[in-house]
Amino acid sequence: METTPNLDEYGAIAAELIDLGVQYGLSLISAVAVLIIGSLLARWLSRGLRARLEGIDKFDQTLTPILTQVVRYAVLVFALILVLAEFGIQTTSIITVLGAAGLAIGLALQGTLQNVSAGMMLLFLRPFQVGDYVDTGGGSGTVDEIGVFMTRMSTPQGLFVAIPNSQIWTSTITNYSKLPRRRLDLLIGISYDDDIDRAVTVFLELAKSDSRILSEPEPIVVVKNLGESSVDLELRAWTAKQDYWSVRFEMTRAVKIACDKAGISIPYPHRQLVFTQLPK
């Protein structure tokens, strides 16, 4: 024969539910407060560390982004552990949960972890640093920041480029700012009717008159190719890396002016049409 609960039993159940609600409600409020405070603290510490590191002249700014992000994530992980402890989860259980979660996340985010490991290798081997102009498999530009997951660049056209670290690490990296000087290779075509030795002399004098072109190694002019309509000469001169583009642009203009003054023609493709009268 079934019995129905009396009022005392209902009261006991209600009291137990209220106690549980108060207990876990306070824990939930505390957990939310810890997460908010942890998030704000992580942001404040990372920004403070960035400002402090950027104020140190001798510190390599390439490491600044990665260090600030490590500090931020460390604070967030600590706040998460405090939240779990608030609900009565023991430390060993927390470590077990984090280990299992880390394994699951690692399997699900293999590409992301590849970006992290590639970023570490880029920081360790240092093929480039902040401020260098590089060309990679994913794009080219001036490096602004090497992050945990991606490298941020800005192009000469004023565009923002973000490239995953793994894409950079698995491709060929050309660093135009690593070495202190660069060689200028300027191809100049002259007519077959022109005097090659005279053209070589004119181009060498032009190169030696520019103070930005280094005297060692000495600039040279070589016959690069015998083309269909021109003899291709190549002026090879060394200059400091920061002067490369200005020297290239100005030297190209100066070569044209010098050729005009010296009577050296720069040929261009043309066609000769011959009309013949067909017999009637």
Image (tube, rainbow, N blue to C red):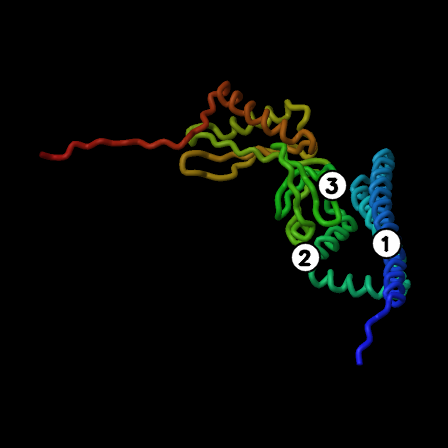
**What SS does tag 1 mark?**
helix
Residue 256 position in % (x across, y down): 51, 24
Is 154 left, or right, of 252 in this rendering? right
Residue 261 position in % (x across, y down): 50, 18
In this view, the residue farthest toward the top is 261
Q: Which residue is mark 3?
A: 145
Front residue of 120 and 109 = 109
Kindly indicate the quadrant of the structure image that contains residue 236: top right
In space, the residues marked 3 and 1 are separated at their CA atoms by 43 Å
Q: Amino acid at mark 1?
A: Gly
Bin the neighbour count of mark 1 within 10 Å (Cα to Cα): few under 14, some 14-19, many 20 and up. few
Front residue of 166 and 242 = 166
Kindly identify the residue that appears in the image at 71 percent across and 53 percent down. 115
Q: Amino acid at mark 3?
A: Glu
Whichever of labels 2 and 1 marks the residue nearer the N terminus, that label is 1
**What SS does tag 3 mark?**
strand
Q: Is residue 122 above or below residue 102?
A: above
**What SS does tag 2 mark?**
helix
Front residue of 69 and 145 = 69
In space, the residues marked 2 and 1 are separated at their CA atoms by 39 Å
Residue 168 position in % (x across, y down): 67, 49
Bin the neighbour count of mark 3 within 10 Å (Cα to Cα): few under 14, some 14-19, many 20 and up. many
Kindly identify the residue that appears in the image at 80 percent across and 81 percent down. 1
Quarter of the image with the C terminus in it = top left
Q: Which residue is mark 1?
A: 25
Q: Which mark is residue 245?
A: none
Name the front one of labels 3 and 2.
2
Is 57 left, or right, of 236 in this rendering? right
Q: Which residue is mark 2?
A: 111
Name the front one of labels 2 and 1.
1
Bin the neighbour count of mark 2 within 10 Å (Cα to Cα): few under 14, some 14-19, many 20 and up. few
